[in-house]
Amino acid sequence: MIATTTTRSYRLLARSFNTHYIPDLTKLAVTKRPTLPALNDYYLNKRFSTLSNSSDALSEQSPAANKWNGLKALDIAVVRQIKSELMEVDANSDGRLDANELKRLLHKHNTVFTDSEILEIGELFYSGKSGGSVSFDRFIAAVDHVASRADKGGTDAAKGLYDGQHFKTSERHPLGLSGCGLEYLHTGRDHHGHYTEEELAVKLTHVEPKTIGDKIAFNAVKIVRFLFDSATGWRSTSITVDNTLNRVIYLETVAAVPGMVAAIIRHFKSLRTMERDGGMLQMFLEEANNERMHLLTFVRMKDPSTFFRVLVIAGQFGFGSMFLTAYLVSPKFCHRFVGYIEEEACATYTKIIKAIDTAPEGSELAKWRHEIAPKIALSYWKLGENGTVLDLMKAVRADEAEHRDVNHLVSGMKEGQLNPLYDPQAKLDQTLLKYVNDLMKRKD
C-alpha cells in the first residue's frame, strides 16, 4: 500500500511538470523511488538549465548567471526550499500558483506577514492575474528577479520597491501582472496611523521652480499665503491657540478642494475616453478625504463663528472655481501649485509644533502637550487612547508632507503612468523580497 501511494504521488508530481519529462520521472519513480530532495534536484537540473530559453523566462536574465542558467541571485538550496513550499500549498497539484495558494504560502511565513497583508496581497495577485495563476517556474524566476535587483543596488534598490519609484519603469512585471486592480482597489495609504518616528520627523523640502509654469505656481502660492494669513489673523511670531485653530480650520476647508477637483476631472476623462486612469482618481479622492478629516478634527476643538463660515463659503467658491478652470487647462501646473501649497502647510505645522514644544508651562499652548486629542483623531490616526494634541499636529504634518511629495511627483509624470503612491506590482515585489529573505534566514 505504501509503495502504491508513493508511486502515485510521483506520477501526480510528474503531471505538474512539463510533459516532456513525464517518461523520465515515471521511470525514476518506479525503479529508484528517490527522496523528495533528489527529485527536486532532478527537476531543477532539467528545467532550470533551459529556463533562459523558455517562454517563462525573464528577458533580463543572463545565461550562466550561476549554476542554474537563468537564475541570478538564488542558489539551489533556496530554490529547492521554494519549490518544496510551492508543492505543499499546491492544492490541485497542477504545478501552478493561484491567489488562494499564494495566501497559504505567505501564511507559512506569518512572522513577517500579517493577516491583513496576506489578504491584500492575495487580492492584488487575483486582480493582477484576472483570477488566473502562474507556473512554479515563473514564480521562482520572479523571486530571483526581485532578489537580484536588491543584490545589485543594495539597500537603495530594495527601498526602491517601497518608495514609489517602481511605477516609473516600463518593464513587464516578471509575474505578468496587469494593472486592472488599480481602477477599483483602495489605492491610497490604507490608513494614516502608526506613523514611524522617522515619518513623523518631517523634513522641510523645497522643489526649485524651473519652468515658467513652476515659477507662476510658486508665486501664486505666495499670493494665496498672504491672503490666508490676512483672513485668519495668522502671525508666525505670535502663535496662540486661537489663531492656530483659525489658521488650520480655514486652511483645511481649502486644502480639501484640489484633490476632489482632480478626481472629478479624471473621472469624467476616463468616462469620455473610455480608458483606465491608473489609480490616480482613487489616490486624489483619498487625499481630499484626508484633508476633510483634518477639518473635522479641528472643528471639535473650536466651533467657527458665523462670519468665519461665510469666509469659508466665499473661499470655496472663489478658489474652487479658479482651480477647476486651471486644472482643465493644465493638470501639471495645478499639481505643482498644490505641491508648493503643501510645502507652506508643512512649514506652518512645523512652527506650530515648535511653539507647543517650547511654550512655557501653564500657558494655553503648553496644555496641548498633555491634552487628549479629539476622539475622531485618536481613531483615524490611531494615536492610542492617550494621544495628545501635539501628537495630532505631528500626524497632520506627516499627511501634508505626503501630499507635498505626491503632488510634486505627479506634476512630473508622463501620461499613462500609474499611481505613484500605491503600485500593486511594487507591492508584490516587496512581498517576494520579504518572502525570500525570511526563507534564507530560516535556512541559516
Image (cartoon, grey):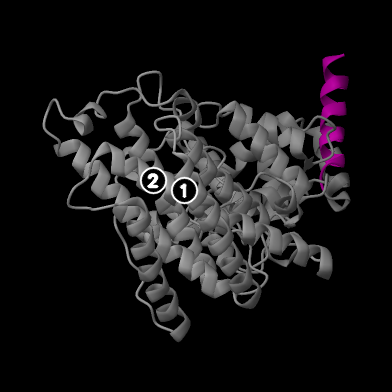
Name which quarter of the figure residue 36 lies in.
top right
Disc 2 marks which amino acid? Val
* Distance between mark 1 and mark 2 Cα atoms: 6 Å
**Membership of 10 in magenta stretch:** yes
Which residue, given by chain and number where applicable, does mark 2 sit on? 248
Q: Is residue 420 visible?
A: no
Mark 1, other Cα within 10 Å: few <14 / some 14–19 / many ≥20: many
Q: Residue furthest left?
A: 360
Quarter of the figure with the N terminus: top right
Q: Which residues are magenta?
A: 1-17
The percent position of residue 154, horizontal first and vertical second, equals 39, 57
The percent position of residue 406, horizontal first and vertical second, equals 49, 59
Q: Is residue 227 visible?
A: yes
The percent position of residue 111, horizontal first and vertical second, equals 50, 26
Name which quarter of the figure residue 392 lies in.
top left
Residue at (52, 36) in percent of width and height: 439
Q: Residue furthest bottom?
A: 212
Residue at (63, 67) in percent of width and height: 417
**Membership of 51 in magenta stretch:** no
Disc 1 marks which amino acid? Glu
Q: Are marks 1 and 2 in contact (CB under 8 Å)?
A: yes
Mark 2, other Cα within 10 Å: few <14 / some 14–19 / many ≥20: many
Residue 252's disc number = 1
